[in-house]
Amino acid sequence: MITIENLTKYYGKNRAVNNISFTINDNEILGFLGPNGAGKSTTMNMIAGYLPMTAGKVTICGSDISKEPVKAKRNIGYLPEIPPVYPDMRVREYLSFCAGLKRIPMVKKSSEITRVMQLLKITDVKDKLIKNLSKGYKQRVGFAQALLGDPKFLILDEPTVGLDPKQVTEVRNIITDLKKDHSVIFSSHILSEVSAVCDRVVIINKGDIKAIDTIENLEKQTGGSLMLHVKIKGSRTAAANIIEIVKGVKEIAKIEAEGNDFYEFIVQITGDGDAVRSDIMSELLKNSIQITEIYTEKPDLESVFVQLINSKTSKSGIEELYEEIKAETADNAEKEEE
Amino acid sequence: MFSVYKKDLQSFFYTPFAYVVTALFLFMFTYMFNSGLGTLDQATFSFTFPDIFYNVIIFFIFLIPILTMRTFADERKFGTEVLLMTSPVNVVQIIVGKYLANITVFIFMLASAMFFPIFTAIKGEVVVSQLICAYLGFFLWGAMYIAIGQLVSCFTENSIIAAILGEIVMFVFLFIDNFAMTDFIAQYPTLQAFLYAFAAQPRFAYFSQGFIRLSDIVFFLSAIIVCLVWNYIAIEKRRWNRG
């Protein structure tokens, strides 16, 4: 388990990471989500022991990374944002060097290198110079390096950037497979990726944690109610009257005419989506209105994300309020002058 | 430590780098050797190897920075510093590993230069004891310059700048005794003594005359240790201040 307690990082006077705490459990894929410049890479660099923290503590399998760095670093494999490869080395040479750095015993070395090369499908480029490889291959060589020695924890900083769609799927599958006996922290600013792979997500913006939860919970919490789409054939007003009084319907958000007595109702509902849906269906059918299509739509993860990113922490809220007041008084003064 | 050493050695010897540097070194050596031979009839003193070494050292200013400029600058440039820093090795091991790799290339250069004494021994006479002392002094001086070059290399991301900075520092170290001997500095005896304490040239002069003095060895070794410790501090400090 990795425990992160009150981690803070200042670059000079700039605060990059502000007092964040979370844990990464065993056999878990934790997504680390945030817009560019949110402090993702800084946090990962601190967890991996590259950057020292201004304050706080990172514990990996019980060893503090700043007090027992060598012991703690044995349990992690790190793929930084830019793959740390030497352009003048051949792939196999490079992996052999990394295996030495990670103190993999001589006996196991060769089999271990073969294993990671097969896993990432780089066996066919093993004798090429790294500088001649494409971005996607370099990324995979960097990833292979992180997997050497089978560390318990993997820290991957945007592992799919620069890969083509097929490779992205492959890398995602590898990450999902790793879950069996590893824990993975994996940063991204691509939502669909995180929701496809991760068990939990940490959403971070401007150095503050905005949310730590499972994707489902996040959707429930902030998205609020589900949207139900009902397409019918028949009288619009009759259908509207029926739908409105069904228990669990909050409001009819929109009615769209689709020509020739076909209408689509977009209904905002509260509570259990399935129950409300079957109620609406039976009520409509009772009144002999035909249903051509009915489905519930989950609130868009994108909007959840945007909402969380823009949500204000208490402190910044007050600061912004002050600024607003200042701006207002300035505006008023200008108007008076006019 | 061994893996860092091995990797750096590979980067020297699997590429033309080590051979080109050695060739340059031998070229300078040859030039000095030939010009020594050419002026043999006009020379006041007998022609000796320590003299050649003495003259070749001036070219060290250009040669050693080329050898050491990439040591840390390239690690930073390619982002591979992250790999080293997040691996279960500590910074001391990285520095020592890299230093030993640089030293190994230097020894390779010195070993190649053995050609000249061997050649001379066949055709003429070589004072072996003097030669050994000169070699030792030469090695220690080079080792000190490599430590300086390596230190300078960790201050910048650009290897060319690292080389030029290294050249300036080494130039100062080479001519500090000449500077200390100027009339201007001679007005301040304390300052003169202080500057003179840093001079490596007179210490090498003892070696080239066939003296091995403990104080000279201690001077070079302590300079090496100071540079390597400073190297460690500089790397750690930059990690803390980064950004």
Image: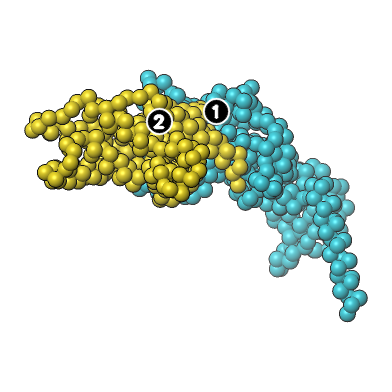
Chain colours: A cyan, B yellow
Q: Residues within 10 Å of mark 2 (few under 14, many from 20)?
A: many
| Residue A94 as seen in the image, left or right of residue A68 | left
* Amino acid at pointer 1: Lys
Query: Quarter of the image containing the C terminus of chain A?
Result: bottom right
Q: Considering only vertical position in the picture, is A329 above or below B144?
A: below
Task: Find disc 1 in the rendering and name its residue.
Answer: A73
Task: Find disc 2 in the rendering and name its residue.
Answer: B220
- Give the distance between the C-alpha atoms of the residues marked 1 and 2, in whole angstroms: 36 Å
The quadrant in which residue B170 appears is top left
- Is label 1 or label 2 in front? 2
Q: Considering only vertical position in the picture, is B144 above or below A195?
A: above
Residue B171 x %, y %: 39, 46
Mark 1 falls on what kind of element?
Answer: helix
Kindly tell me whether residue B126 is visible in this rendering: yes
Query: Quarter of the image containing the N terminus of chain A?
Result: top right
- Which of B161 and A215 lies nearest the eye of the viewer? B161
Q: Residues within 10 Å of mark 1 (few under 14, many from 20)?
A: many
Mark 2 falls on what kind of element?
Answer: helix
Q: How many marks?
A: 2
- Which of A290 and A160 lies nearest the eye of the viewer? A160
Residue A98 x %, y %: 43, 32
Q: Chain of mark 1?
A: A
- Which of A6 and A236 lies nearest the eye of the viewer? A6
Q: Considering only vertical position in the picture, is A92 above or below A247?
A: above
Residue B82 x %, y %: 51, 38
| Residue A130 as seen in the image, left or right of residue B151 | left
The quadrant in which residue A259 appears is bottom right
